[in-house]
Amino acid sequence: MAASSSADVKIPKSPVVILMIGMAGSGKSTLMHRMVVRLSKHKKVYTVNLDPAVRNLAYPVNIDIRDSVNYKEVMKHFGLGPNGAIMTSLNLFATKFDQVLNILNKRAENLDVVLIDTPGQIEVFNWSASGQIICDALAVSYPTIVCYVVDTARCVKPVTFMSNMLYACSILYKTKLPFIVSFNKIDVISHDFLKEWMEDFEKLGDALSRETSYVASLSKSMSLAMEEFYRNLRSVGVSAVTGAGGEDFEKAIQEACTEFQESYVPFLVEQRRDLEEKRKASVEEQMKTFERGLDRAKATNKRGRDTDLDQLGEDVQNLSIEERDYMMDCMD
């Protein structure tokens, strides 16, 4: 059968996929809950949790990584720390992400929005192979937007603000997708001063000049270079607790969707085959990395747990991603 040309490939306009990325404590999962509550009133919402170490979630989950990968078992058998175990678990889940796409494809006609929660250790999602695998898989299938959640209260110091913006810049560069910065917790402190710093680098420079640390000096020298980044950056203020800014958030999503269709779809359709081949190569490499890690664990195993490690390897090979039976009705 002849391969279809890029012109035959279409990326539908719905459902819209929103990747929620944010540092631990930024209120990302709480914002997920707030958006589920708000959007479910007039849209059909679907949720995916990619954090293998989270204990409790305030929102109903349709697909949960914890149902497929046991984070604590991975940590124990491979002798990893928490972050290493989260990364390994997410990498393993990403190798089977086609199963997630198959589930979404079955539900797509009846969905408007897919919200995806990610680990608070943003470097785990953003810089590991799994992040790229998941982003590429979603972007060539549905309109995909990245939402970077920032703790406004923690950005009072200009140095911390610059650190967050550098993270935002790196995530935008890595994902190459429409981007929204959500300044969360505006019920605690207004984000107006952050907007001023983004719109007028001289005000940010004045704030940095009152700092005396080396990092402040470095940040000041970078502020001018970041001006171009800020100019095209879409940002909103929200409160995951009170729901303030929800309307602005929805408007930003609509703008990002338009940007995706106009600026990203032509490129993605053209490069779809290359992206798919690159993703398959990454999946194969992740499986090889897992197998090498399994071999090392067996070689250093002194407690006779080879049987457990063999079982873990078999479980990964046969990893099946299941859908939870949740109805996403309007929530109080």
Image (cartoon, helix red, strand yellow):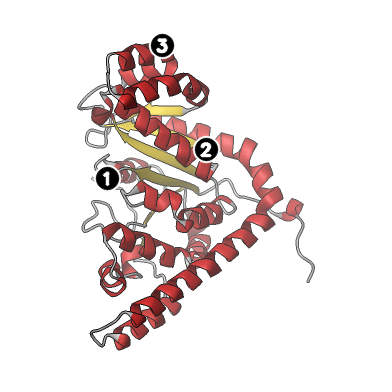
Q: Earlier in the sequence, mark 3 or mark 1?
A: 1
Q: Earlier in the sequence, mark 2 or mark 3?
A: 2
Which sits in the foreground, 308 or 63? 308
Give the residue pinned by disc 1.
24
Residue to which mark 3 is pinned: 202
Q: Residue at x 46, y 28 (%)?
A: 234
Say what amino acid the circle numbered 3 marks: Glu
Residue 246 appears in the figure: no
Q: Is residue 71 left or right of residue 177?
A: left
Q: Which mark is residue 178?
A: 2
Name which residue lies at 31% across and 63% down: 85
94 vs 151, left or right, is: right
Frontmost of labels 2 and 1 is: 1
Residue 21 vertical placement versus 206 (above, below): below
Residue beneath the point at 31% across and 15% down: 207
User: Where 45 falls versus 203 (above or below)?
Assistant: below
Separation of marks 2 and 3 at Cα, in angstroms: 27 Å
